[in-house]
Structure formats: C-alpha cells, structure tokens
Amino acid sequence: VRRNPPTVMGDGRSSIKKLMLEENRRRLTDAKLTALSPLVIDYETILCLRRQGLTLRHVPEPGEKVLLKTVCNQNTAAENESVTAEVHPDTIRYGAEIARMFKLELVGVDLITPDVSKPLEAVGGVINEINTNPGIHHHYLINNPAEGVPVAQKIIEYIFAKASQQTPTIRYAQD
C-alpha cells in the first residue's frame, strides 16, 4: 500500500486551519471509516506549510491541494493506494528472505522508494522497517477497495492450510 501524506483541498473561501477542522468533522461523522486519527496541527504541520510559503490562515484556491505533513500517519483512505501488483519481484524476494531469516510467518515490509516497480538498488529505495505485527488494516483503507488485496482472508487461509497439515495430538493428564 502506498500511503501518501495528508492533504486538504481548497474551496476558495476557507483557511487551511478551517479546512483541517472540517476534515476532522467529516472523519468523525462519516458512516464509513476513512481514517484512523484526526488531523493534528503540530510543529510538523507548521513547518510543512512554511516550506510551501503558506500559513494556517492561507485560503487555498478552489481545487488547490495543500500538503499538510510529510509523513502519512494522519492520512485518509483516499490518500492510500494498493500497489501490490506493481511491487518488483526482487523486493518480494527480499521480504521472503527476511521472513525466513528471522523465522517469521507473518511480516510487513515498509519501503521508502520513488518507484516500487523497480529494484530498490536501481532507484535508491530502502527497506526502512520490518513489522512482525503488521497493520493489515492499511490494505482495506485505500482509495479503490476493488484493487485491494484481501490480506486478512489470505492470512486465515494460510492458518487453516497449515493446521490441516498437522496431526492432532491428544494428551491425557494423570493425577
């Protein structure tokens, strides 16, 4: 899943601060879960806006997209996209090798790369984190759910397939 940083879209009337407050209100009242946390005005927000020559009081033009942060933790499903089908085979092999090396059955591999379809070495990409308890919810909070991978279902299928290969053992306890 490519997780992009949070943004707001200008309407030509509202300040960035007001657009952020409206987005938080929408996140709270929307019947469908679209985000895991509210947008927070913090030092990172101020710096990100400053780098763009903006402040919280700036009123973006209609349709103008304003980047609020450089990290993606407060983004929405609309800012996430499934890229599983695009991941380069070498990167998939790296993930499998890491799982084998650490004897992990379930692992999430976080990448920083400009192009997930190319080998990491070719584009200056890196594996920046290995998660032994990955957040599979990110595969469901995406902009086009039809393109998503049903990760939870695949994990359950794996568990049942593995369990069906094991011979049950019955033990009796004696006093």
Image (spheres, grey):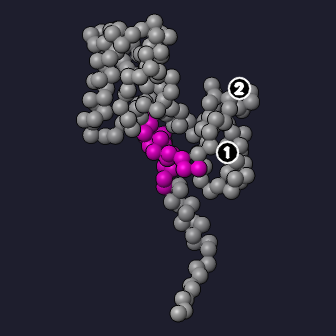
Tell me which amino acid carries mark 1. Gly
Q: Is residue 78 visible?
A: yes
Q: Position of residue 127 (x, y in %)?
A: 66, 36
Would residue 100 be found to the left or right of residue 156 on screen? right
Q: Classify 10 Å Cα crowding around label 2: few (below 14), some (14-19), many (20 and above).
A: few
Q: Residue at x 47, y 41 (%)?
A: 138
- Image quadrant where residue 31 sits: top left
Tell me which amino acid carries mark 2. Gly
The image shows residue 58, relative to residue 113, as above or below, that is above
Residue named by callout 1: 95
- Image quadrant where residue 92 sits: top right
Residue named by callout 2: 124
Would residue 148 be found to the left or right of residue 107 on screen? left
- Does the magenta segment cover residue 17? no
Residue reaching furthest to the front: 175
Q: Is residue 62 visible?
A: no
- Does the magenta segment cover residue 146? yes
Nearer to us in this view, 118 or 77: 77
Q: What is the C-alpha distance between the residues marked 1 and 2?
A: 17 Å
Q: Position of residue 107 (x, y in %)?
A: 60, 49
Q: Classify 10 Å Cα crowding around label 1: few (below 14), some (14-19), many (20 and above).
A: some
Would residue 16 be found to the left or right of residue 44 on screen? left
**Sequence order check, earlier mark of 1 and 2:** 1
Residue reaching furthest to the bottom: 175
Q: Residue at x 72, y 48 (%)?
A: 97
- Image quadrant where residue 111 sits: top right
Q: Which residues are magenta?
A: 132-153
Q: Secondary structure at mark 1?
A: helix
Dot label at residue 144: none
Q: Residue at x 28, y 24 (%)?
A: 22
Residue reaching furthest to the top: 53
